Image (cartoon, helix red, strand yellow):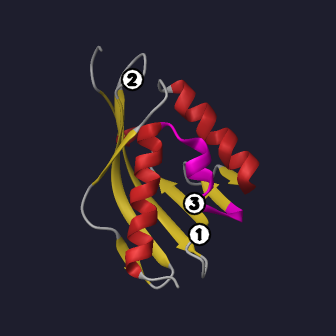
Amino acid sequence: MLDARSIREVFARYAACLGDGDVPGIVALFSPLGVLEDPIGVCYRGPEQIAEFFRSSLHQVGGSIRFVAEGQVRISGRHAACAFTAICASSSEPFEVDTLDMATFDEHGLIVSMVAIWGPDNVRALGPK
């Protein structure tokens, strides 16, 4: 049964998996027909493409991304959104990105679609390691 608690748990697991560099854990949060747009307009479909996106992204930033929620997950039925700061401190040039992640869930609590809204104006350098 999909409820607000389940949706909040998925967002928390998503953030934890990014912090751990756990690509299989991230992919397990998505429906087999799941779609990811990150950033919005750049589409990855199904577990293989989603896994490859996260493997490549995590590799580029040193293996992990600390995802810090900026407030509560906003939920309406099967739809939810949460603002995050993605901190890439292990990158060769550390940076952070403000992102708004919106997701739609199926009846089993799996992500059917996730859209990450961010752009160049949301990226900030953190300075040398």
Residue identified by numbered label 1: 110
Q: Amino acid at mark 3?
A: Leu
Residue 94 location (% of width, % of height): 35, 23
Disc number for residue 29: 3
Asked where in the image residue 107 lies, by quadrant, the reply is bottom right
Give the CA separation, mark 2 to mark 1.
29 Å
Q: Quadrant of the C terminus?
A: top left
Amino acid type, callout 1:
Leu
Q: Callout 1 environment at 10 Å: few (<14), some (14 to 19), or many (20+)?
A: many
Q: How many marks?
A: 3
Between 25 and 81, the one lying in front of the other is 25
Answer yes or no: do the residues labelled 1 and 3 have beta carbons within 8 Å?
Answer: yes
Residues shaded magenta: 21-34
State how far apart marks 2 and 3 are (Cα).
Answer: 24 Å
User: Which badge, 1 or 3, is on the more N-terminal residue?
Assistant: 3
Q: Is residue 59 magenta?
A: no
Q: Secondary structure at mark 3?
A: loop
Rendering coords of residue 27 (x, y %): 62, 52
Taking the spot 47% from the left edge, 65% from the top edge, the residue there is 102
Amino acid type of the residue tagged 2 in the rendering? Ser
Which disc, if any, is residue 121? Answer: none
> Going 47% across and 46% down the picture, which residue do you hit?
17
Please name the residue that numbered disc 2 is placed on. Answer: 90
Q: Where 4 sits versus 81, above or below?
A: below
* Figure check: 3 above or below 123: below
Residue sitting at the far left? 71
User: Do residues under tags 2 and 3 come within 8 Å of each other at their CB atoms?
Assistant: no
| Relative height, residue 78 to residue 128 (above, below) | below
Marks 1 and 3, how far apart at CA:
5 Å
Give the structural element (helix, strand or loop) at label 1.
Answer: loop
